[in-house]
Image (tube, helix red, strand yellow):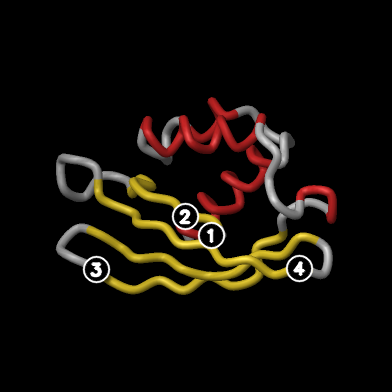
Amino acid sequence: MIADRLLRGAFEVIDRRRAPASLRAGVSPAVLGMIASLSTAEVPGRAAGVAVLRTVHVRRGARGHLEVFGSYSRGERRFAVAAQLSHRTPPGSPWIVTSLRLS
């Protein structure tokens, strides 16, 4: 599933296990910048361990968009994740993450 793969990749960058450039094909420039910034910042719970994606749910949003939400853990703590995926133009091209929220 594309949403699962893209979220796992984002967590790998945030946890400094992968270079931000590796996400370039699957995320918008704004989201890539945010993820790259998080990889150098103090992220809540980072000391508890690496982020592990636990659940991913996908719902169709507006035309050409998918709403993604789920949970991830760091050690014993659980956190929420939400994202929006959009089709690139032209229609039928790969999905790209255009919005990402971690809490």
> Neighbour class for label 1 at 10 Å: few (<14), some, many (≥20)?
some
Q: Mark 2 or 3, which is nearer the eye?
A: 2
Residue labelled with disc 4: 77
Check the image and report above or below for 9 versus 23. Answer: below
Which one is earlier in the sequence, the residue at label 2 or at label 1? Answer: 1
In-front residue for pair 59/39: 39
Image quadrant in which the C terminus is located: bottom right
Within 10 Å of the Cα at label 4, are there few (<14), some (14-19), or many (20+) other Cα atoms? few
**How many C-alpha atoms fall within 10 Å of the one at disc 2: few (<14), some, or many (≥20)?**
few
Q: Nearer the viewer, residue 37 or 84?
A: 37
Res 28 → quadrant? top left
Residue type at numbered disc 2? Arg
Q: Which residue, given by chain and number where applicable, does mark 1 sit on?
A: 4
Residue type pointed to by label 4: Arg
> Mark 2 to mark 3: distance in Å?
16 Å
N-terminal label among 1 and 3: 1
Residue 57, position as x, y percentages in the image: 47, 74
Q: Secondary structure at mark 1?
A: helix
Which comes before the other along the chain, label 1 or label 4? 1
**Image location (x, y in percent) of residue 11:** 63, 48
Locate residue 29 relative to residue 22 in the image: left or right: left
Callout 3 amino acid: Gly
